[in-house]
Amino acid sequence: MKSCFAAVFTILMLLFCGCGGGSTSTSSSTTASITITPPTATVATSTALQFTAAVQNASNTSVNWQVNGVTGGSATYGTISGSGLYTAPASVPSSPKVTITSVLAANSNITADASATIALPVVVNPSDVLVAGGLTQQFTATVNFSTNTGVTWQVNGVSGGNSSSGTIDSNGLYTAPQSVPTPSRVTITAVAKADTTRTASVTVTVTPAAVVITPADAIVTAGSQQAYSATVLSNAVKPVWSVTCPSTIPGACGSITSDGTYTAPSGPPPSALITIHATLADGSGSTGTVTATIQFGSSSLAGRYVFSIADDVGHAAPTQAGDIVFDGSGKISGGLFDSSDNPGVPISVTGGTYQIGSDGRGTAAIQTATGSFNLQLVLSSHEKAFIVRTDSTANQGAGTLELQKTISGTSALNGAYALSLSGFSTGTSTTRVTEAGSIFTASTGVISGGFIDLNNLTVHANSLTSGSFTQPSSEGRGTFTFSTSNGSQQFAYYAIDGTHAIIVAIDGTLDARGDLFSQPQGPFSSLALKGHFAFLISGANSQIPFGAAGVFTLDGSASVTDQQFDGLTQTVFDFNPGNYTVTDPTTGRTVLTWTANAGSRLQYVLYPRNDGGLVMLENDGVYHSLGVALQRDSYLGNFVVTPGSFALRLGGSESATPSVAERYTGEVRPATSSALTATIDGANISQGSAFALNLVNLNPNHQRYVFGTSADATLANRTLILYRVNDNQAFVIESNDTRVLVGDTQRQY
């Protein structure tokens, strides 16, 4: 027993002491490790680099070497000897970064990695560039195989180059020859000083010398001129000049003569930018381009413009319609108009002055045979402006100016026209009259039929029984008369073109103005009146002003859907879809009804226009309101960030003082993705007042934008609601318990 215990004890002691042939072992608490030098390196192709492995905490320091996990490496990624000498492959592989691994021979679980990037011996940057004649290009060279990183430079094999192919200095700055060599591609080579057999080359394509245009980025006022000149390598040249812009309308970009004299168009084109091009006819120079910004100016009003002015909240200020001739340089040279305070007797425009600022805002002082009046205005383009009569802060008239495109016999009425008319009965300041309808005209001067809806406290719907019209004069003025069971009415019209005319009552019974728009070919049906519409209407109930703006859809099957609108003290949503019925296929007369939030059933009469729009008259006896519905697109973006600027008009009054009008014109432009800035003018505010409109809410489906103004703004603490029609137009309404303003914005550029 005793001897057996001793034997066991002896064995345990031997195991505990680790006796085993006299070899040295590391403690079980110390782990072997390897460190590779260098840890990272760049190695040129076919070049060798020594890696070393330092082994710690192991008695056996032998290691094996791998490249990308392969012992000894491979021809693709390079080889490595048992002593750690790595030799890069002859070409750069698709994955130029390889992993060098050292593996402990006694324990393959103990490893260390280093990385090597395989590169060409010499690398030149940039590669394959274009350099215009006479200009320079900086090149750099990187030497990857030696600590001597110096190089010498060659052009087409010639050290330093020459005048025909270009020169290069010791720092790699290449100067192209002034003339394009043959061939036009030259070779730039860097030769390593450490080993002249190691080189790298890139190609340069020499292009014709650049045509440089002066001035660059000019600002040119509409209608004015700007002289341009061109040089090549500081030498004056006579290029072929041209001008382009984002418009296909003839003349919208302006014009430029052979000597470089540019004449700006009458108004800014889209984006307000034009591009001037200069090209050498023999191709010896590359085309030069510069841009210019076009601004509004007095030349933006040039020609004969049809205008109308009315006081929609009363008729203390007379309704007027006619034309004014602007000479393009700040003077008014003529015109003719009809006024409700002198019905049936045209009044001559005898002179006047005007000025237009760079943002399209301006003023005009018109002299006439019976007196003078003043206008403030804002142009949306050379062809159209919003205007406000500013003679009196108590009674302001508002309207539009539109360029007359055709006059005399070519403007004669011919075909079907949708009619809209709004105003007051003469002799009273409270009896409003609104009309909508369709009249059929023939070139013989006969009005052969039609239909008229009249709302003058009582709603009337009558067939037109007879009528006639006169051909327009050289001023574009003509007259027409028609009769219904309610009596006869006589108007003067001023043709804008063959599809649109402004009308004004001249029989002494009405103080009213309106429009004639040509109509599409009938017969009409519910399907013909299909589409998405944005609308704007205004009027009053007794002396309480009213306005509404919004959207609706006619589905082509007699249903009105997707409606939303804002009116006096209410917002109406699509809770109760409406309906519409074409009551007269010949004129397109359509009756539309829907229910407002308060449960009242609202009814309107629609007449189609040739531009896709609808004349819209309320005929339910609740309000005397008249307006327009325009086809809208399906855009679902953010209208606020649309580049450019917009002309703005707003008009209305406080219900407590309905005879006191508020009229504004101005300019609006995006400021940020959630804000607009506005500059407005009005008879009862400081001219050029500026304020911000901050986006409060956006409904992308209806394209309804709600903006708020600050307490210190010109229009303080107001909420303006905007309904987008398309990228170029939106309707606007502002209303609360005591005030309503309606209007629209139209793109300037």
Image: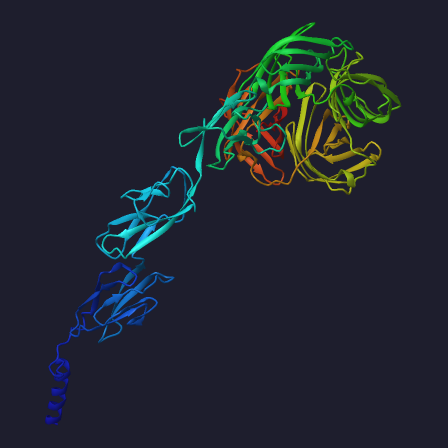
Residue 62 location, quadrant: bottom left
Q: Position of residue 594 (x, y in %)?
A: 73, 35
The residue sitting at the top extreme is 370
- 126 or 136, which is in the foreground? 136
Front one among 690 and 461? 690
Asked if residue 379 can be seen in this view, the reply is yes
Q: Which quarter of the rendered picture does the N terminus lie within?
A: bottom left
Left or right: residue 329 versus residue 316 is: left
Q: Nearer the viewer, residue 726 or 618?
A: 726
Viewed as shown, does residue 562 lie left or right of 449? left
Q: Is residue 149 above or below residue 116?
A: above
What scheme was used to colour the molecule? rainbow
Who's the residue at 14% across and 83% down the image? 20
Residue 718 image-quadrant placement = top right
Q: Position of residue 68 (x, y in %)?
A: 32, 67
**Quadrant position of residue 501:** top right
Residue 645 is situated, as x and y percent measured from the top left of the image, at 55, 28
Q: Residue at x 69, y 33 (%)?
A: 630
Say which residue appears at 51% left-offset and 25% top-offset.
Answer: 260
